[in-house]
Amino acid sequence: MSVNWKNGLSLLLLLGLFFSFLKNFWNNAKAKPVTKPTIKGDYRSYILATLAQNGVYGELAKYIFSQAAFETGNFASVIFKEQNNLFGMKLAKVRPTKATGEARGHAVFKSLSDSIADYVLYYNYVKLPTAFTSIPAFTEALKNKKYFEANYDLYTKGVELYYKAYFL
């Protein structure tokens, strides 16, 4: 079987596109927190106040806020903007929820307040502790409850990054 130069060129282009796809897929699949987050709007005050209205205070509220900042890419993700979903929550099927539906594989909320209330419903439903000594202890408890599938170290570093940006 002989291969002419057009078939060879086509094969090379196809391989190049395939490897380019793999590279982009791999880079997008890795959890990459923003390296230097900046404070966006007045989300900190609003989220902390709404957490307090739902019975969450102190360091735990700061940890949860930092988690929301990480989950949304510092309040920039499409799921946050279009679905009012601060935590990347999936639609709950066996517990009470404040979600109004589902889009893009995630829960849709009427408001940010409902997203926060739903997270607190989840938190209480899976019986997570209300006090932690550190962010790694907080994220370890979340990992143990299968809250996230990402690499534990990357997730923890992401939450810590936003904690430092907003609270230190």
Image (spheres, helix red, strand yellow):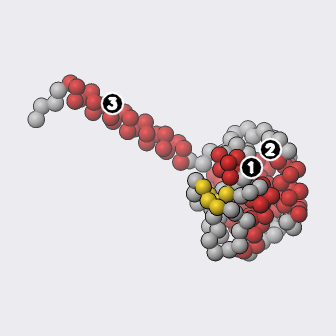
Residue receiving disc 2: 165
For disc 2, the neighbor class at 10 Å (few under 14, some 14 to 19, many from 20) is some
Q: Quadrant of residue 32?
A: top right
Closer to us: 44 or 133: 44
Q: Position of residue 67 (x, y in %)?
A: 73, 55
Name the disc covering residue 82, or none: none
The Cα atoms of the two marked residues, 2 and 3, are separated by 44 Å
Name the disc covering residue 13, or none: 3
Q: Is residue 62 above or below residue 3?
A: below
For disc 1, the neighbor class at 10 Å (few under 14, some 14 to 19, many from 20) is many
Q: Position of residue 136 (x, y in %)?
A: 72, 60
Please name the residue shown 82% across and 47% down the image. Answer: 43
Three-letter amino acid code of the residue under disc 1: Ala
Q: Quadrant of residue 133?
A: bottom right
Three-letter amino acid code of the residue under disc 2: Ala
Q: Quadrant of residue 140?
A: bottom right
* Quarter of the N terminus within the rendering: top left
Please name the residue shown 68% across and 48% down the image. Answer: 82
Mark 2–mark 1 CB contact (< 8 Å):
yes
Q: Is residue 143 visible?
A: no
Three-letter amino acid code of the residue under disc 3: Leu
Closer to us: 130 or 133: 130
Q: Is residue 145 above or below residue 9?
A: below
Name the disc covering residue 69, or none: 1
For disc 3, the neighbor class at 10 Å (few under 14, some 14 to 19, many from 20) is few
Q: Is residue 12 visible?
A: yes
**Residue 51 appears left or right of 80:** right
